[in-house]
Image (spheres, grey):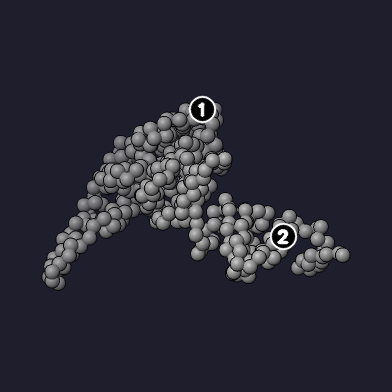
């Protein structure tokens, strides 16, 4: 008997089916023929199947065989997370011929996919800003290979997820956070450090590659004259001078947001008390003083041409254009990252912008 498969436009012999089609046909047949009210155990339900098909296929099969209990063994975290109403467990440890330790997936503020990804890590966790495969994640993987790096987009997510992970009990590892300094005050950064959340000493992670020591290593690598460094510094200082009002305004806005996030209006026993407490609350927002103090600091940095002090406080992710311009390349940041992965001196020059506590946690195994 000749069995045919039917595509969108034509029929073809079953032997011409792809591995994914064959697996899907096999799975459907096995599930539909399973005994009533039984257990259906599926090892790696995603095997050979396209991502767009996996969830839909198993949703349909579960609905068709609602009399059965489905048990999935999977490494696909997206698929595991898609089983919304399932009981989820993880294998904490095992000895193949002795014993297995299996625990329920704990309830936690962490997103489920991140929780499942990190629970089994034997290394300590380092949450950072950025997304999967972003420059942030690549840089931290280069600098801290003994950590499991998890990029979680915003600095607030880094803070929240670090705290949440460290609330978990009986895990193999501990979580730490690393954030850009942005416009945060020293008092806020000190408070975060008590929660194992650290900061680089520069406003933006991109500024690491503008560190003067790193630029010297990069110039030597490209066999370029160090005059390029002076030109880059000059252009960045000039650009900073042009952006000074924007930088001050962004700083004041961040300071206001921080004040609102960490303060509150004291409760009152009557409406007059409420108004009084609100006036006190508003009075502490000293916009003009904050503006003038910041302006005084930034103008001093410009006057003294304090390049190190400027890149420490300059929030501008577009400064890489000056690397492109003076090195006459179109991908300064990518070239710098590639160089970082191969050069010990470059790593050491950048690591000085990180807190010693975090380096010590990494056991100083930086290469």
Q: Quadrant of residue 60?
A: bottom right
| Residue at 51%, 27% in the rendered image | 220
Query: What residue is shown with label 2?
Result: 26
Residue nearest the observer in this picture, 22 or 191: 22
Q: Earlier in the sequence, mark 2 or mark 1?
A: 2
Instruction: Say few, some or many: other residues with alpha carbon within 10 Å of mark 2 (under 14 / 14 to 19 / 20 or more).
Output: few
Query: What residue is shown with label 1?
Result: 220
Mark 2 lies on a secondary structure that is helix
In the rendered image, is residue 284 in sight? Answer: yes
Q: Which marked residue is nearer to the observer: mark 2 or mark 1?
A: 2
Rendered location of residue 195, percent (x, y) = 32, 45
Residue nearest the observer in this picture, 327 or 272: 272
Mark 1 lies on a secondary structure that is helix
| Residue at 22%, 60% in the rendered image | 264
Rendered location of residue 87, percent (x, y) = 49, 59
Q: How many marks?
A: 2
Left or right for 193, reference 14: left
Q: Quadrant of residue 62?
A: bottom right
| Residue at 60%, 67% in the rendered image | 37
Rendered location of residue 239, percent (x, y) = 40, 45
In the rendered image, is residue 134 in sight? Answer: no
Left or right for 292, reference 350: left
- Residue 29: give its label: none
Mark 2 vs mark 1, CA separation in Å: 60 Å
| Residue at 30%, 43% in the rendered image | 194
Left or right for 143, reference 274: right
Residue contact at pointers 2 and 1, CB within 8 angstroms: no
Rendered location of residue 196, percent (x, y) = 34, 43
Residue 357 position (above or below residue 280): above
Q: For the N terminus, which image quadrant?
A: bottom right
Residue nearest the observer in this picture, 227 or 106: 106
Task: Residue at the far bottom: name it.
Answer: 271
């Amino acid at each position: 008997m000749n069995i045919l498969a039917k595509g969108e436009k034509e029929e073809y012999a079953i032997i011409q089916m792809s591995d994914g089609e064959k697996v899907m046909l096999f799975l459907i047949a096995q599930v539909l023929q399973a005994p009533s009210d039984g257990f259906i155990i599926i090892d790696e339900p995603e095997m050979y199947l396209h991502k767009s098909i996996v969830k839909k296929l198993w949703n349909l099969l579960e609905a068709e065989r609602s009399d059965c209990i489905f048990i999935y063994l999977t490494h696909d975290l997206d698929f595991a997370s898609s089983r919304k109403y399932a009981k989820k467990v993880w294998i904490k440890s095992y000895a193949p011929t002795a014993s297995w330790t299996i625990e329920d997936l704990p309830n936690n503020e962490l997103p489920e996919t991140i929780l499942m990804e990190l629970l089994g890590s034997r290394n300590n966790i380092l949450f950072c800003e950025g997304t999967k495969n972003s420059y942030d994640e690549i840089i931290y993987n280069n600098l801290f290979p003994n950590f499991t790096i998890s990029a979680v987009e915003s600095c607030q997510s880094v803070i929240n997820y670090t705290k949440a992970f460290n609330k978990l009990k009986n895990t193999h590892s501990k979580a730490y956070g690393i954030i850009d300094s942005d416009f945060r005050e020293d008092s806020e950064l000190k408070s975060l450090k008590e929660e194992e959340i650290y900061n680089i000493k520069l406003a933006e992670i991109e500024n690491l590659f503008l560190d003067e020591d790193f630029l010297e290593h990069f110039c030597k690598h490209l066999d370029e004259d160090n005059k390029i460094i002076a030109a880059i510094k000059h252009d960045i200082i000039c650009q900073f001078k042009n952006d000074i009002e924007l930088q001050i305004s962004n700083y004041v806005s961040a300071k206001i947001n921080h004040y609102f996030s960490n303060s509150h209006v004291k409760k009152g026993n009557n409406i007059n008390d409420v108004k009084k407490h609100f006036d006190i609350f508003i009075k502490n927002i000293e916009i003009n003083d904050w503006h003038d103090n910041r302006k005084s600091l930034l103008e001093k940095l410009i006057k003294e041409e304090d390049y190190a002090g400027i890149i420490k406080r300059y929030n501008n992710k577009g400064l890489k254009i000056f690397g492109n311009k003076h090195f006459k390349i179109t991908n300064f940041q990518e070239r710098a990252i590639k160089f970082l992965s191969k050069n010990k001196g470059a790593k050491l020059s950048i690591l000085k912008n990180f807190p010693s506590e975090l380096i010590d946690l990494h056991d100083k195994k930086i290469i």
